[in-house]
Every structure is written in C-alpha cells, then in structure tokens.
Amino acid sequence: MAGRWPYRSLVPIGVDIVLVLSVICITLFGLLGIFLVLSKKGNRPANGLLGAFFLLWALDFLDGSLMLKGFYLQYPDWALWTEPSIFLYGPLIYLYTRYMVGAKLGFSWADLLHLIPFFLGLTAIIAIYQLQPGEVKLQILKSVLDLEQPPGSYLVFVLLYAHFLCYIYLSKSQVRKAAGHLEHFYSHGTLSWLNRLLNALIVVLLIAMVNSALQLAGSRFYFEMGLIVILLATGVFIGRIILRALDRPSTLVHGDLAKKYAGSLMRPGESEALSIKIAKVLAEDRLFLDPELTLEDLSNAIGASSRKVSQTINERMGKNFFDLINMHRIAAAKKIFTDRKDPKLTVLEVMYEVGFNSKSSFNTQFKKRTGLTPSEFLRLRS
C-alpha cells in the first residue's frame, strides 16, 4: 500500500523527511502489531487479525525505506517479495470486523478463498521477476525507479485498489448491520472507533490512488510530494484512532457478544419489579454517568440477568439500553445547562460530566431529544 514507492530522485530534504516519517510509521505499526498478536486479553482471534494487518503495513513501510536507500539495487533477489501482501489487507480487515461485531466466531475452509488473490499475485511476482536472471531484475527495478511503468501496470493498480475498497465496503456493511443490535447491550457507540478506522483507511487509500496515478503519468515532483502526504495522513489518521482505542480498551467489542433476550422466561410481575429497580438505580446511583456502562453493569447493580433486564427495557419501557441511558444523560445535561452558575461553562465539560465521550454522539442525541444542539440550547439559556 503506502510503502510501495519508487524513490530514486527525491530531493535530499524530501528523502530525509520520508525516511523519518517511515521510521515513525514502522515503529508505530510494528509495536502495535506485536502487542495485538501477543495480547492474551479480549478477543484473541480478532486481536491477531488486526495485529497481522499492522505488521504487514509496517513491513510495507520497511520495504519502501529499503527501496529509498537503494538496498534492492544491491540485493535484487530480495526485492518485490512483499508486493502480493497488499491482497491480504482487505481480507484481514474484513475478518477482523466480522469478529468484532460477533458475526464471525471461528475460521472455516471457506475463509481460505480470500487468499486466492494473494497466491495469484505471488505466483505472478515469481514468474515475472524472481525467476529472471540478475541483469533483468536490475532492469526491472530501474524502470520502476524511473517511473517507467509497463502498460499492464494500469490494470494491476486498478485491481489492487478495487480489491481493497471492496473489502472496506463489506466491512462497513457489517458495522452498520451490527450497530442496532449492539444498542441493546452498550451505552456508547461501541463500534464508532472501528468505523473511524475504516474511514481513515478509505482516506489513505484515496490519497494513495491519486499518488499512483501520478506515478503512472510520470509526474515525479508531485508523486514524490505525495509520498510525504501519504505518510503524514497515515500517521495522523491511523495513529490517532489506534491510540484512542488503546486508551479505551473497552471499546474493543468481544466476539462472544451476548444474545438478545430470546428464550428467557419471566414470572408474572417480574418485569414490572425489574423496571422499578432499573429506574431507581439510574435515578439514585446515576450509573449513566459512567461512559463505559454496559447492560451487564446495570444487571449486576440490580441483581438480575442481562437477558431479563434487556427484555424489561425493550418490552416494558419501550426502549433499548442505548436509548434509555442516553435519555438520562441528556436530561442531566439539560439540568446542568439550565441551573449553571458558572458563565464559562462549556459544552465539552458538560458532555464529559454526563457520561458521553464523543462530541458527535452528544450532539446527535441532544438534538434528537430537544430539537437543538447543546450549543444552541446553552445560548438560549444565557
């Protein structure tokens, strides 16, 4: 992906910038990949898939750095081995997403079909490059460095990007399907960070597509400047998302998500009693102020099973868990805005105080229930 670049005529300053940024990306993604692969917490198969994705990306950046330093011109037999790995990015992200939303709880033989493009690409690299004599390999490398791409390169680039974009689309579809179901169990946008990760990948991919077009057109200066943009975009978008996820580990949804309350049996009057307990514990203990509150947390607080609590909220209170908790949060926010004594009170302060950890989610929920954004509501109370 971002690491597959010819570097030959970058100006010295540009070379230094690219190398520094590449080292940062290699370190960030390499350490993150190792951490996820070796982690024994949470959903280990999902962590392993995401870890493999970042390790491959780190390898991609390393490959680009070696090309920049002229390493492959001295050791041409080592070049281009990593090229087919781009066909693994999409399947890894897609399978990881399926684990995260609970739609995939194990590997099957059918999953091996996702590896077909990778093995086809590996076969092509071996036939077209690796089996050639040394002088032919050097000629191929020099043509790549000089941005002299053969006509077939256009088709290859289209296939590569179409392949990855297709998997990103499938992954986002899985997230959309799961979002409604997860609202029965979590009080926050559990998959929001995963969605941001996918959006960031789309942004980086689009920039890389433009840069590849400049490469095919032989526009060296803009192509070389595009390398720096790709590195910066990759570090900013992906790095920020992953660091935030690591800061809030609970946002990583386990693959063994609880099933909805189907099949639970409740005694006569039990639902009414549970609804009273739910209302009481939310009003008195104000559990909704915890931004990481889950259905299991609420169930433990009232001493009932998660299935029965979920069923009570859905059938007797006419809401899902997500809506119930956010209803209380918005009511608390309105009261703070209305009773405020500090004229310097900010929307962000109130957002965190009532249990939200996302400004966009706070704005959406507040407007949904009041018809106004928090800022508009605050101005009207000024």
Image (cartoon, rainbow, N blue to C red):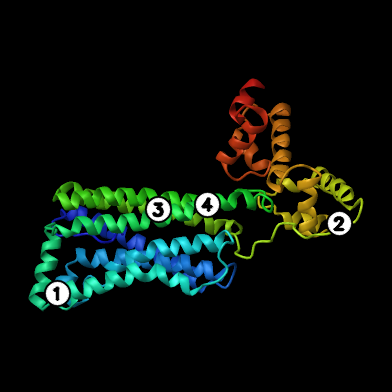
Residue identifier under label 4: 193
Give the crowd class for mark 4: few <14, some 14-19, many >=20 residues within 10 Å: some
Find the distance from the CA under tag 4 to the CA under tag 2.
36 Å
Mark whose residue sits in front, 2 or 3: 2
Q: Are marks 4 and 2 in contact (CB under 8 Å)?
A: no
The residues tagged by marks 2 and 3 sit, at their Cα atoms, a distance apart of: 46 Å
Q: Who comes first in sequence, dot 2 or dot 3?
A: 3
In x, y percent, where is residue 366?
Answer: 64, 34
Give the residue type that dot 1 points to.
Gln
Question: In this rendering, would 312 be left or right of 59?
Answer: right
Q: Is residue 201 above or below residue 99?
A: above
Considering the numbered disc 2 on the image, is that residue within a helix, a strand or a loop? loop
Q: CA distance from mark 1 to mark 3?
A: 33 Å
Q: How many marks?
A: 4
Dot placed on the residue nearer the N-terminal end, 4 or 3:
4
The label on residue 74 is 1
Is disc 4 in contact with disc 1, using a CB cutoff of under 8 Å? no
Q: Earlier in the sequence, mark 4 or mark 2?
A: 4
**Foreground: disc 1 or disc 3:** 3
Q: Amino acid at mark 2?
A: Met
Per the model, the C-alpha gap separating discs 4 and 1 is: 43 Å
Which numbered disc flags the more N-terminal residue, 1 or 2? 1
Q: Which mark is residue 201?
A: 3
Q: Are marks 1 and 3 in contact (CB under 8 Å)?
A: no
Q: CA distance from mark 1 to mark 2?
A: 74 Å
Q: Which residue is mark 2?
A: 266
Give the image quarter of residue 148: bottom left
Q: Which quarter shows the C terminus?
A: top right
Q: Where is residue 106 shown, x and y percent of the image?
A: 55, 71
Query: Disc 3 residue type?
Result: Leu
